[in-house]
Every structure is written in structure tokens, then in C-alpha cells.
Image (tube, helix red, strand yellow):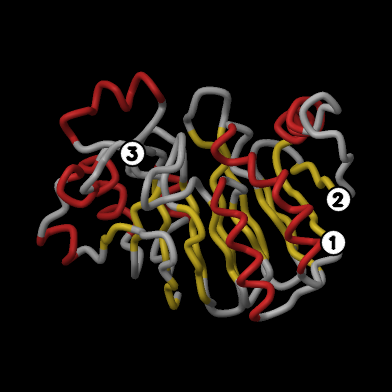
Amino acid sequence: MRLVCLGTTGYHPSQSRHTACYYLPDQGIVLDAGTGLFRLIDQLLQAPRRHIDLILSHAHLDHIVGLTFLLDVMTVTGLEQVRIWGQADKLDAVREHLFHAALFPVAPSYDFRPLAGASGRVPLAEAELEYFPLDHPGGSTGMLISTADKRLAYVTDTTPQHDPQLAKQLQGVDLLLHECYFGDQHQQLGLRTGHSWLSAVTEFVKLTRPRQTLLIHVNPLATDAENELGLDAEHRELGMRLAEDGMVVQV
């Protein structure tokens, strides 16, 4: 299993980062559809696929606007079918608003697949998806992607998780992608906006003990995100590092 980081920031793009989008080329899975999705073109030109599964964590614009870029992706690559998974109300919002004729006049031919309930399991073409609720205004969904020998967890747009059942579910994953929007100096802002800060993410890492952790969905206003978050030797010893656009990670 490999992970390609197509977009690693939140809210809006910055000079060096696009918004949330991650690609598992060996499984044909895309996690979220932020502005980084346009980079999927290069990936599919290098290793063509006819079908992909795209899973939305929620419907905030920095995670869905790239759905409108898929027409270009399908035009210039061999991609023929996109299955879009997400909570039913989020998919309804995408179809009603993002693809409203006044905003986007070309009706897309995507295959929208609602997830049943707040948590559950879905077999994908080349992996299994487990999904679970996260604490975020408007609701957000976390994901666990499993193959025969690897597990990747995607936990974005959430306040820190203290659910022991979730910690058990994600125990020892091969790669944890976890939002870390703020340093500890902005903890109260994190609580108000539904985002995570470094010490809380660190405690979750200590609970779940993933083999690797990538900190994602960082503040786009942070010109030096590693220093502004406060990453130090303790975090590196725990296997925590900052995700960067273009990064390729062997899971």
C-alpha cells in the first residue's frame, strides 16, 4: 500500500499546499476531494485506472470542491467510473448545491453511494472501508482502509477523540493520518471550530500506537507549520511527522 499526498492543508490553499486529497494508487482509492484533486491527472497518466472509489469525510468546501475537477481528470485520462461514498446528507448537499445548474452547468455522471448509518463497513474494489463518526460542526466521518496486510486510518476535521472504542479500533494501524490544524497555543480556537491541536493528537497517538503518523489538514496561514505546531524530538520518536504535498509514503 502506498499513499500519495495530493493536498494536505485545510480551509483554503496556501502557497505550498492544496486542500485535502489523498490517493492510494494500488487500491484506486481517493480520500476527500479538495483542491489537490487536480493532481490526480498526473497519477492516472502514470498508472492508468478505469475505476476509482472516492470517499468523502464531509461536505465542507475544502473537501469537495475538487469533485468539479473530475471532468478534466476523466477527459484526459482513461478514468471511466467514479464511485463517490459519503454520508447520505453530505452527498445530497453535493448534488443539490455544488452541482446546481447555476454553479456547474454540466451534470456529472458519478455513481453516488451513500454510507448506511454513522458507522459500518463497506467492501470496496480492492480494500475494505470501515467508517465512524467524528466530532466536527456539521458532522464528519473517519475512515479505516484495510487490505490483506495493511491498515490506514484517516481522521480529519475533528476535535480530539477520547473514545476508548475508537482507540481500540485503530490500535496499531500501519499509518494514521490525523488532522493537526493548531499548535497548543490555539487550543480554545480548536474547540470552538472543531479542529485538533498538537498535544491532543499526541495523546491519541500514544493511545493507538500507529507505526507511522502523518499530521494533516494543517493551518494554511502557517508559513512554517512544523515550528508553529511545535514538533520536537518526542513527536519524532513517536513516528509523527508533517505531511507535505507531493509526499509519497510506503505504508
Residue underneath mark 3: 219
Measured as percent of width and height from the top left, residue 191 is found at: 33, 23
Which residue is located at x 20 percent, y 52 percent? 226
Q: Amino acid at mark 1?
A: Gln
* Secondary-structure class at tag 2: strand
Residue 89 — which label?
none
Which corner quadrant holds the C terminus? bottom left
Relative to residue 102, is residue 167 depicted above or below?
below
**Nearer-N-terminus badge (1/2):** 1
Mark 3 closeness class: few <14, some 14–19, many ≥20 residues within 10 Å:
many
Residue underneath mark 2: 111
Q: Image quarter for residue 129?
A: bottom right
Mark 1 closeness class: few <14, some 14–19, many ≥20 residues within 10 Å:
some
Residue underneath mark 1: 81
Which residue is located at x 62 percent, y 48 percent? 33
Labelled pair 3, 2 in contact (Cβ < 8 Å): no
Q: CA distance from mark 3 to mark 2?
A: 32 Å
Q: Image quarter for residue 31?
A: bottom right
Q: CA distance from mark 1 to mark 2?
A: 7 Å
Labelled pair 1, 2 in contact (Cβ < 8 Å): yes
Q: Amino acid at mark 2?
A: Asp
Q: Amino acid at mark 3?
A: Asn
